[in-house]
Image: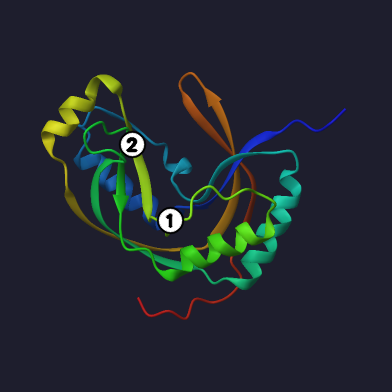
Amino acid sequence: MGKVARRVFIGIPAGEELREQVLEFRKRHDWLRVRWIRPENLHLTIIPPWLSENPESVCAVLRYAALHFPAADVEFTTLSPGPDAAKPRLLWATGKASQFFSTLRDELYARIPLERTDERSFFLHLTIARVRLDEQDDIVRMKLLIPVEWSACLRTLSLYESILKPTGAEYRVLCEIPFTMENNNEP
């Protein structure tokens, strides 16, 4: 009998300092009628979900990558609806992605037997809330484009299992590996 495939993705957990900045924003905007992402689920997706029969082998690749990449400085400058401004499903913070993210993603794709479906450059975003279908029009009318100044150092790389439920996806961390190299980048 073969192994059961699990829906997994690779991400970088938001970390404490970024979670605190998001929670502060949430307190000031609790009037927004959205489903806020639980703080422990905040992450940056590096490789989107796929079905894996061998998550342990993916964790081995993450251990290798964590040895060869430094912790990553990240800066978010704008909070807006996305990905489609006319029918937004999410509220997300965006910013300019450093080369780090594309290089890390390319290295992971090179080491994981996975068909790459997206060749676009890395899009830096942190989903902080989901927009309910019946609230999309209200969110569009608000023309939300909120400047933020969120910055953090992201220190770990994780493999998550995404368990789809009627109430939305639930995430379970299968492995979390700290980046071991020092970050020598200037902020």
Looking at the rendered structure, the secondary structure element under dot 2 is strand
Looking at the picture, how far across and down is residue 40, in whole percent?
Answer: 47, 42
Numbered mark located on residue 120 in the image: 1
- Quadrant showing the C terminus: bottom left
Q: Quadrant of residue 106?
A: bottom right
User: Residue, x 54% and y 60% (percent of image)?
Assistant: 105
* Earlier sequence position, callout 1 versus callout 2: 1
Numbered mark located on residue 102 in the image: none
Residue type beneath disc 1: Arg
Residue type beneath disc 2: Ala
For the residues labelled 1 and 2, the Cα–Cα distance comes to: 24 Å
Looking at the rendered structure, the secondary structure element under dot 1 is loop
The reply, left or right, for residue 10 in relation to residue 51 is left
- Quadrant showing the N terminus: top right
Label 1 packing within 10 angstroms: few (<14), some (14-19), many (20+): few
Q: Which residue is mark 2?
A: 129
User: Residue, x 21% and y 32% (percent of image)?
Assistant: 32
Looking at the picture, how far across and down is residue 125, in whole percent?
Answer: 36, 51
Comparing labels 1 and 2, the label whose residue is closer to the camera: 1
User: Residue, x 39% and y 57% (percent of image)?
Assistant: 17
The reply, left or right, for residue 42 in relation to residue 22 is right
Task: Specify how the rendered protein is coloured.
Answer: rainbow
Q: Quadrant of residue 104?
A: bottom right
Looking at the picture, how far across and down is residue 37, in whole percent?
Answer: 39, 36
User: Residue, x 38% and y 80% (percent of image)?
Assistant: 186
Q: Is residue 104 above or below residue 28?
A: below
